[in-house]
Image (spheres, helix red, strand yellow):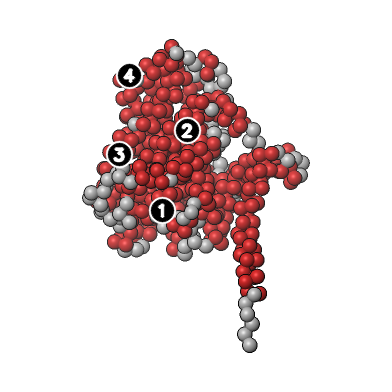
Amino acid sequence: MDSFLQGLAMVFNVQTMLVIVAAAVFGLFVGAIPGLTATMAVALLVPITFYMDATPAIAAIVATSAMAIFAGDIPGTYLNIPGTPASAAYVGESYRLAQKGRARETLGTNLVCSVIGGLFGTLVLVFVSPSLAEMALNFSSFEYFWLALLGLSSSIFIAIGSRVKAFLSLTVGLLLSTVGLDMMSGAPRFTFGVPDLMAGINFIPVMIGMFALNEIMMFYGSRAEARSVPVMAKDSVFAGAPKHVKTYWRNVLRGSSLGTLIGALPGAGADIAAWIAYALGKSRSKEKEKYGTGHIEGIVDASSANNSGISGAWVPALVFGIPGDTITAIVIGVLYMKGMNPGPTIFMNGGGQVYALFTVFFVANLIMLPIGYLAIRASKVFILTPRKLLMPVILSFCIVGAFAINNSITDIWIMLIIGMVAFVLARNDFPMAPAILGLVLGGTLENSFMSSMLKSNGDLLAFFERPISAALGALVILIWLLPSLIRLVRRLRSSPQSSHKPRSS
C-alpha cells in the first residue's frame, strides 16, 4: 500500500502534470503533421528526458505517443492524408465521412474510442502483463510467418474495388520490401549501387509519397471544389460519440482486445493492430457493403485497436525487456538510463516507480479528452485555409519528414518516385493500403519463412506442427479458400432450383 501511495505522489504533483500536458500538446502537433510519426516525436523527446527524473521522463513519452497516434487522424479526416501510419488503415472512412459534413462527429468518436482502447490496454498492462508477455514469447518464426500472411491476406479482402488490383498493389509493396541486403547471403538486392538502399526502403517515405504527395498531385490535377470538405458551424464534437460507442460496443471491446494482443507481440505495434482490427471488423459486420463509403463502424474498430496497441507494446518491454514496437525500443533505453532495468525484477525492486508508471498511463489517456477536444475544435483551420496555401506547406513538411528518418536525400527521391507511381495507380483505381502493408510486413514474412526453413531443414509440414502455428495456418488457408467455397455453396443452392423448373413445351 505504501508503494502504491508513493507511486501516486510521484505522478500527482505540479512538475509531472505539467510535463504530461506539455508532452500531449507536443504529440498533438507532431502527429497532426503528415510525414512526422509518433516514433519521431518520442525520439525528439529523448535528449530532453536526460534532464528529467524517471517518472516525468516516462510520462512525457507515454503522453506524446498516445496523443500523436490520435492526432494523425485529424489531417486524415480533413485532407485524406494520414498523419501517422496507424491512421492509414481507416483514412478513407474518415475522409468520406468528412465529405458528408460529419468531420467533428468522426473525430469525436475516434477520440473517445482511442481513450477507451488506451485505458483497456492499460488495465491489461496492470493485471495481465506477466502472462500476456509469456504468451507473446511463445510466438516463434512459424507463428510470425502465418501472422504476416494473415495481415497481407486481410489487406486484399478489405480493399475497396477489384481484388485483382488490390493483389497487384500488394505485390508492389512486397517487391519494395525486397530491396536491401539478403538476410541469408548478405548480397545486395535491387540497390543499383546506392549505399543508402543497403538497409532497405523505409515505409515512412513510401507512406508519405503514396498518401500525402499523391493527394497533393490529385488536388492540382483536379478541381479543388470537388475535393473540399464542407464546413459545419454548429456540429458538436461529442454529440454522436456516446451513441456510436453504445451501438458498436462489441467493436470497441474487440478492437481494444485485439490491439492489446497484437501490441504485445514484439515488432507488431499499433500500425498492424489497426489494419487487422479494421479487417476483422469488416468481416464480422452486418453492413459490409457500407465499408469504404464512410462508415463509422470501421473507425470504431481500428481507433480502439491502435491506442490499446500502444499499451500492449509495453508488456514485453517491461516484463522481458523486449520492445513491442519502435517506441518501446526507445523507451527501454530511457528506462536503463533512469535505473529501471526492464525484466521480471522491475516488479519486485521497482517499488512505487512501477505504480507511478501504471498511473501515468491512466492519466495520459484521460488527458487526451480535453486536449483532443480543443484540437478538434481548432482543426477547422484545415478547411478554412485555402488549399492552394495549405498544400505547399504540407509538401514542405512531407520533405522534412522523409529526410528526417535517416537524414538522407535518397528518402526524398523515394518519396517523389513513389508519389508519382501512386498517382498513376490511384487514377486507375488501384488501392494504396495493400502496398503499404506489403512493404511493412514483407520483411517479417521473408525473415520468418527463411528462419523457419532453416529450423525445419526445409520441411514445410513444420509450419503446422506447433498448435498456435497450425491454428493460424488453418485460418489463413480458410481465408484464401473462402471466396471459392462461397461460390460453390451458391452454385449448389441454385442448381436444384434450376433442375426443378418446368420445361417449356
The reply to whether dot 2 and dot 3 touch (C-beta < 8 Å) is no
In-image side of 103 versus 254 (left or right): left
Residue 449: x and y in percent read 67, 44
Question: Which residue is label 4 attached to?
Answer: 13
Question: In the image, which disc is placed on residue 295?
Answer: 1
Q: Earlier in the sequence, mark 2 or mark 1?
A: 2
Q: Earlier in the sequence, mark 2 or mark 3?
A: 2
Query: Disc 1 and disc 3: Cα gap in Å?
Result: 22 Å
Residue at (32, 29) in percent of width and height: 21
Q: Nearer the viewer, mark 2 or mark 4?
A: 2
Q: Earlier in the sequence, mark 4 or mark 1?
A: 4
Amino acid carrying label 2: it is Gly
Query: Disc 2 and disc 3: Cα gap in Å?
Result: 22 Å
Question: Which residue is label 3 attached to?
Answer: 373
Question: Which residue is label 2 attached to?
Answer: 121
Task: Name the foreground residue: 31 vs 303.
Answer: 303
Image quarter hosting the N terminus: top left
- Is residue 345 positioned above or below 120 on the image? above
Image quarter hosting the C terminus: bottom right
Amino acid carrying label 3: it is Tyr
Residue at (28, 55) in percent of width and height: 230
Local crowd size for mark 2, using a 10 Å CA cut-off: few (<14), some (14–19), many (≥20):
many
In-image side of 24 versus 162 (left or right): left
| SS at badge 1 | loop
The reply to whether dot 4 and dot 1 touch (C-beta < 8 Å) is no
Residue lying at the far left of the rendered structure: 233
In-image side of 352 versus 457 (left or right): left
Residue 424: x and y in percent read 46, 62
Residue at (31, 35) in percent of width and height: 371
Q: Earlier in the sequence, mark 2 or mark 4?
A: 4
